[in-house]
Image (spheres, coloured by chain):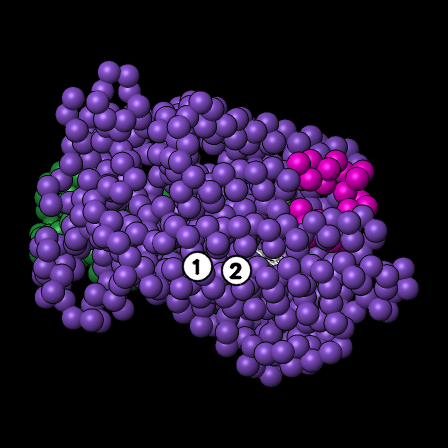
Chain colours: A green, B purple
Amino acid sequence: MSPIATTRSATGIPTGRLAVWWVIISEIVIFGGLVTCYLLMRLGNPEWAEYASHTSTPAGALNTLVLLTSSLFVVIAHNAAEHDHDGAKAFKFLWMCIALGGVFLCVKAFEYTTEIHHGFTITKNVFWSFYFIATGLHGLHVIAGMVIMAIISFDVKKGKNFQRVELIGAYWHFVDIVWIFLFPLLYIAK
Amino acid sequence: MSKTDHQVHPSDHGHGHDHEMNFWSKYIFPLDHKMIGLQYLWTGLFMALVGGFFAYVFRMQLAFPGESVPGFGHVSPASYNALITNHGTIMIFWVAMPMLVAAFGNILIPLMIGCDDMVFPRLNRLSYQIFFISTVLLFVGFFVPGGAFGGAWTSYPPLSARAEYNLTPWGASIWLLAVALEIVAFLLGGINFITTTMNSRAPGMKMMDIPIVVWMINIAVVLFMFSVGPLVAGAVMLLFDQTIGTSFFVPSGGGDPVLWQHLFWFFGHPEVYVILLPEMGIVAEIITVFSRKKLFGYKMIVYTTFMVGILSMIVWAHHQFIAGIDPRMASIFSFTTILISIPIAVIFFAYIATLYGGSIEFKVPMLWALGMIAEFLLGGVTGIYLGASALDVYFHDNTFVVAHFHYTLIPVVFFGGFAGITYWYPKMFGKMMSETLGKLHFWGTTIFFNGIFIPLFFLGLAGQHRRIYDYRNFPDLAGMQDLRIFATMCLIGLLISQIPFIINFVRSIKNGEDAGKNPWKANTLEWITASPPPHGNFAEMPTVYRGPYEYSVPGRKEDFWPQNQPS
Ligand code: HEM
Ligand SMILES: [Cu+2]
């Protein structure tokens, strides 16, 4: 028997959703802190524009597209689970999303190797330190999201815990939105 | 969350099936919120002894410089710094947070809102386990080559960023990692507090029927979450500076050390309120019960607390008045800093109004609560001096500031902590503590606490800097050694005064008088169930009919009116 606590809903909002929002907000303040530091230092160091010109805008743009598409797939999966109660379809779209996460990581890995190859390492200067830490931290979140999504997908396939698709979806959108901030800051603003 | 959970532990919430659980699943890896709360409490109390011991060692060095300290030995400058650093770190992160926020939050929230557990019991356990690992890690830091980190609990770079500067190639990073893990543990714990309070209240309990301490713990947890995020980012950056040589905070590599100060104090100042608020809640519960009066201005207190939380996030740069801050910025931060004393004062006046005309019973929990109000006053008033940027330039970094923050922190952490422990002890263990030993503990602590820190105000005014190993090196400071010795003697008195508490605590678990369900005749829901509460907390889940502070209602025979009693 689960604790009664887990089944109550005094606010009318499912407890799982409240929890995921808590996680998302605490992550927002973490990334928020990082991005704010970057902005403050960037504004004080106009020469960073030159450093930023060595990041690959096409690769970043491609990855933006990849992530946005993956977010769309999560929405479709959510819809399939919530409205149609179609676990198989939700499973399929969750895995398409995971696959796109994989594409994102491959592109990122390719970028990292070329950059490091050209001598732009994490200790090169503070811009590159920010670049690697921000994108690296974001990449870890992508990996975490993919793992959790995979775990959830198998339950969903068996017809269990459909509500979790929404929860991982919210998290995935968040990871996506972080990228939407990182992309202009690190790639476009030169 | 927990389908599988309960397949694994089928006995967990069958009410009263405690005996089916073995030692490990009951005490070491519990899912029960009360037991997890107690684990936090034990850890917090143990770490208080460690932090207190550190204070003893470095104060002995100050009183008798260069002499061997009984129980420790010779204090080198490096170990002096490490002791001060870890004393501060431990007291804030390993005593105040686990005791006031985690222990009381875990024990009280489900009981006071009338449900059987947290909404995510396994996450709750995980949060303690991470906290435990962080504790071990903190100790590991003492035994690595180079020794423990000695760059102060504020860990200012560039000193903290390069091993060449701080001479602790491992210690600094392990210290930072331990603190980061501790923060993660509390972020995870916070999910439970908030969602449980929002969603799992007993039927009939409206937002404005929630006991004030539960409100305050929740507001504290939200405040913690919002303020700590940037510091987590900063900790990652600092860790990279230490370990792989980035230069976020190192000027020679293009970094900015003052940036760390912003990140640190954006968290560090609200943190004071994170530990103040739960404690203000504890005090509020106690003064209504022991004066048999309704809490004055319940709603106003809740709203004011939100204000305190928000304001506390825009005052941080008062820690940077001497860091070369633009004077126009400084006056803004002076203003907000002094402004925050208004809502705090409002809450305290509400407490005093509650006491006014009440039939006050001076039981031990009440003594601690009243002591807290009185002693905190001195901390608060001296804070106003420090908030004025012009004065702060002189006071900052001498022992005036040390005395000031101990006058806020010790009433909060220890007076508030002891108030809570002695008040809920009967509920936690089913037994009463001895009043005599309790009073001995209270008066000893109060007298010696003032004996330690009042001299520090005067030493500070005379120009005695903080974080200095041996004042004999400074002719201007070499005098007044008598005052330093006096403060140290009082510290030893303070530590000795804790012995009655320890005896009381341990003895009463076995030998105390039986407490019964409701020894203080209080209204809140935790007092309607057995002491200690069984698994699942309530034999019958309560329904709530009224707010928590209906004491001495005219026309009623009894002077209390439990929340679950139908009229
Ligand atoms: C047992 C009684 C205590 C004594 C005698 C004591 C004494 C001291 C002294 C003398 C210092 C500073 C020395 C210096 O800067 O040169 C210090 C630092 C500090 N104490 Fe305490 N303290 C006690 C309890 C506490 C408590 C309960 C807290 C907080 C909850 C606390 C938090 C701090 C902090 C944050 C620092 C600053 C550490 C640093 O500079 O890195 N102390 N303490
Ligand atoms: Cu402050």
Query: Are circles 2 and 1 on residues that touch, CB within 8 Å?
Result: yes
Regarding residue B368, the answer to whether it shows in the image is yes
- The stretch of residues the image draws in magenta is B381-405
Inter-mark Cα distance, 2 to 1:
8 Å
Seen at 59% across and 27% down, the residue is B342
Q: Amino acid at mark 1?
A: Phe
Q: In this view, which residue lies farthest toward the right? A: B475
Density class for disc 2 (Cα within 10 Å; few <14, some 14-19, many ≥20) is many
Density class for disc 1 (Cα within 10 Å; few <14, some 14-19, many ≥20) is many
The residue where tag 2 is placed is B497
Q: Is residue A40 left or right of residue B296?
A: right
Seen at 47% across and 64% down, the residue is B499
Seen at 30% across and 44% down, the residue is B109
Callout 2 and callout 1 share a chain? yes
- Which labelled disc corresponds to residue B501? 1
How far across and down, in percent of the image, does residue B11 sit?
Answer: 10, 61
Instruction: Report if residue B254 lies within the magenta region.
Output: no
Q: In this view, which residue lies farthest toward the front? A: B436
Seen at 62% across and 67% down, the residue is B56
Along the viewing direction, whichever of A57 and B248 lies nearer the viewer: B248
How far across and down, in percent of the image, does residue B547 sit?
Answer: 28, 26
In terms of secondary structure, where does tag 2 sit? Answer: helix
Instruction: Report if residue B390 lies within the magenta region.
Output: yes
How far across and down, in percent of the image, does residue B522 sit?
Answer: 28, 36
Q: Is residue B482 left or right of residue B288?
A: right
Corner quadrant of residue B202: top left
